[in-house]
Image (cartoon, grey):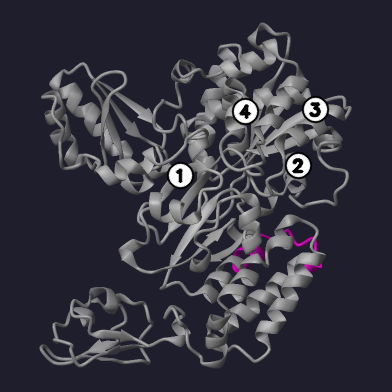
Amino acid sequence: MKIVVGQGSCGIATGAKKTSAKFEELIKDKGLDIKVDTTGCVGNCYLEPIVDVYTDENNFRRYTKVSVEDVESILEKELSNEAFEGNLIGEEDAKFISKQTRIVLRNAGLINPEKIEEYIEVAGYEAAKKAVCSMTQDEVIKEIEISGLRGRGGAGFPTWFKWNAAKQNKGENKYIVCNADEGDPGAFMDRSVLEGDPHSLIEGMIIGGFAMGATEGIIYCRAEYPLAIKRLEIAMDQAREKGFLGKNIFGSGYDFDLRIKAGAGAFVCGEETALIASLEGERGMPRLKPPFPAAKGYWQQPTNINNVETFANVPWIIYNGGKAFGDMGTEASKGTKVFALAGKIKKGGLVEVPMGLPLKDVIFGIGGGIKNDKEFKAVQMGGPSGGCIPKELIDTPVTYEDINKTGAIVGSGGMIVMDESTCMVDMARYFLDFTKKESCGKCNYCRIGTKRMLEILERITQGEGRDGDIELLEELCYKIKDGSLCGLGQTAPNPVLTTLKYFRNEYEDHIYNKKCTAKSCKSLIKFEIEDNCKGCTLCSRKCPVGAITGTVKEVHVIDQSKCVKCGRCVETCKFDAINVE
């Protein structure tokens, strides 16, 4: 028997370390010969902590939301070769994984990320050995071209083309860089891969480095990912010990090694020229292109940059052939894509699906639909650089081309799901606040334009919108898109443009009717207690500012001058006696 506890960041945040320690404690006390092991996030983040009990090498029972108090019951049942029904994963939750097609997440939750032997057991490093020892650079690039793999970090540029451009350019040294500076709010795809399967990234970078002729690779990882950095460092040390990194890797005569650069968390460093500036010790600010990094990048040498998910696809492609990857997805958007489901969704976590699957199948078929069965309103895709897709377009296929037509982008893969209680004006304000703060300040259009847009959005959500604000917002959007130097400024207006396109009525309600349709903006709502109040006094006891008064069994009253509109009273009232206007 073997017990495996999921210890990605999501599992640890919900108590997985304590759960694992309790298993170890009980096993030691009972003198049992049972191994307690660690793995990364399997993707069912909403069910953490997750524990898999292996009865043999291939068969296991999965337990979810395992607290310290559940450990003894699970262990006792398993020792009798029985399942503990209290935490056993349900049939519907088990389908969360079975409905997916996993390439990047192929090892998620199945191997110990800190043990290279477990990665090798699932054909790890076979693709790198094949590429370095028995293929030419052109053959590797051709296989990536056949696969149709496009960059999974933003614009979806063909991976083979970038590799080939770096290969063809001459330089004293060449560099391959992994952009692991995942900065979109609600996105955690790259983090999960780094924490749960770091060797797949390393192997992908070895193959990419060989294809373009680089001898050094750099992983630019945000410092806010300490567990990812720790496991990457362990994986790199193990790869060096095996001869997979360093001098003469795989005995091929090819030298290649990796190092990690921890970034300071600047969103703008997701743009490749800003990332390069940061690597060189400069402030992360973009520069004009051309020259492109493939010609003059890190230290003015040919450089290729891809994100974690892109590299994690590469070993599978080389091992199984480009055609196998290209057979999935659509003609223009091939393979699979990993998405992080977050927001008002029942089953938040990581999913990997073939490109071309409708949004509806991802959100409702895999994600289980909207929390509390509220009405689906929209999904934000592509983070601050993306846009909002309304419920009317829920059947849109997940491809680069189809998503772009809506005004959003696939981006790195964040999906923030919104329900009827989400104010779309406030949502646009939130993303503008983010991009304004993350602007490097180099461009006037981006530095000043986003600030002016944010000021307008803040006025509107505070009930101080003016006639002409919508037209002014639109004018600013297009000028910022046209005048900004890099992708941050060029895409910053997208959340505003898409909400204006699909939810213009909400802007008009805020400005002309002084009303928030979603009943979300505090300055435009008020709480009132209706006549069906039973006088239970629960709301008055829970009110943090003492705004609710009344006697037992009598209708209570809210003092509007004191009310901070926190919504605590609505949450606690058992009689639906509090109305929000």
Q: Closer to the camera, 208 or 182?
A: 208
Is residue 389 positioned above or below 242 on the image? Answer: below
Span of residues in magenta: 432-445
Q: Residue at coordinates 70% horizontally, 8% vertically from top-left?
A: 252
Give whichever of discs 4 and 2 has the lower sequence position. Answer: 2
Question: Where is mark 2, residue-wise?
Answer: 276
Question: Where is mark 3, residue-wise?
Answer: 174
The 10 Å Cα crowd at callout 3, few under 14, some 14 to 19, many 20 or more, is many
Question: Where is mark 4, residue-wise?
Answer: 323
User: Which element is circle 1 on?
Assistant: strand
Camera-near label (1 vs 3) is 1
Q: Quadrant of the C terminus?
A: bottom left
Q: Amino acid at mark 2?
A: Ile
**CB-based contact (under 8 Å), mark 3 and mark 2:** no
Camera-near label (1 vs 4) is 4
Q: Quadrant of the N terminus?
A: top left
Instruction: Tell me, yes or no, whether the highlighted magenta stretch contains residue 16.
Output: no
Q: Amino acid at mark 4?
A: Lys
Q: Residue at coordinates 59% horizontally, 31% vertically from top-left?
A: 325
